[in-house]
Amino acid sequence: MARTVLVTGGNRGIGLAIAQAFAKQGDRVAVTHRSGDAPAGLFGVRCDVTDAASVDAAFTAVEAELGPVEVLVANAGITDDTLLMRMSEEQFTGVLDTNLTGTFRCAKRASTKMLRAKWGRMIFISSVVGLYGGVGQVNYAASKAGLVGVARSITRELGSRNITANVVAPGFIDTDMTAKLPDERRAEYRKAIPAGRFAEPDEVAGVVTWLASDAAGYISGAVIPVDGGLGMGH
Ligand code: NDP
């Protein structure tokens, strides 16, 4: 059965791969884009997840075009790495505002219509770094760990209404975000990953579409790693 899907930050990287995977299986897919154009063939709405009014307007536009959002994929995210001693309060709160509070804004806006429909799937894109930690990533790790608490609390609040909330925790995926890493850091990480390689965005997308499928209807509050074994035990 075709569903209405909204992927935040769906104009590039992992979000684009997720949006394309849903579109390929016949769902009605909308993506938010903050800069640049919407990707060809997908319904795009401009949105900055740090702004509640912008999130509300994006959902309203999607509802008018494709119907209420049944599957929310909160994927928009940023890094702003630096060591704890050098990290300004703005660097900390800025990353939290996009990655964690941005997800809260989207989940809150989506929940009303999901409750009415008595069906919904929320999938939050976290990171292996959320539970494993990362040098220079106090802000990013805190934001990604926070998503686990958000998903589990939503599971307790809305689980009886056929609404699931899960976290996908990717390891290192080849996108613009990881292209920024210096070569030596990339080589170090590659050595630490049991699979011995970074992944392609499609490898995350397959897990996300599965979590939204009927087969995954009894999975909620879970953290699913897609990290080549990097975070085992965390
Ligand atoms: P990219 O940097 O390639 O893309 C990030 C996306 O988020 C872009 O679409 C960007 O929009 C959007 N975005 C950022 N800030 C905002 C905002 N305030 N409002 C709306 N949209 C925003 O990242 P990836 O594809 O690599 O990452 C996607 C998600 O996966 C992120 O949450 C990231 O933390 C997570 N992740 C990535 C990993 C990796 O190895 N790549 C590993 C683990 C997790 P715009 O184009 O306008 O900038």
Image (cartoon, rainbow, N blue to C red):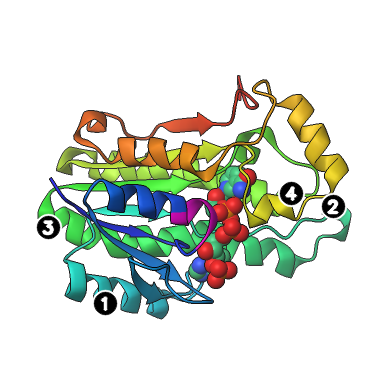
- The amino acid sitting under disc 3 is Arg
Q: Callout 1 environment at 10 Å: few (<14), some (14 to 19), or many (20+)?
A: some
Of callouts 3 and 1, which one flags the residue occurring earlier in the amino acid sequence?
1
* Whole-number angstrom distance, CA of label 2 to CA of label 3: 45 Å
Element under label 3?
A: helix
Depth check: 83 or 215 in front?
A: 215
The C terminus - image quarter? top right
Q: Is mark 2 within 8 Å of ligand 1?
A: no
Element under label 4?
A: loop
Element under label 2?
A: loop
Say which residue label 1 marks. 61
* Magenta stretch, main secondary structure class: helix
Depth check: 64 or 110 in front?
A: 64
**How far across and how far down the image is residue 199, in percent?**
59, 36
Say which residue label 3 marks. 116
- The amino acid sitting under disc 1 is Ala
* Whole-number angstrom distance, CA of label 1 to CA of label 2: 40 Å
- The picture quadrant where one finds residue 209 is top left
Judged by depth in the image, the label closer to the viewer, 3 or 1, is 1
Furthest residue to the front?
Answer: 40
The N terminus - image quarter? top left
Q: Is residue 119 left or right of residue 157?
A: left
* Whole-number angstrom distance, CA of label 4 to CA of label 2: 7 Å
Of callouts 4 and 2, which one flags the residue occurring earlier in the amino acid sequence?
2
Residue extent of the magenta highlight: 12-16
Say which residue label 4 marks. 137
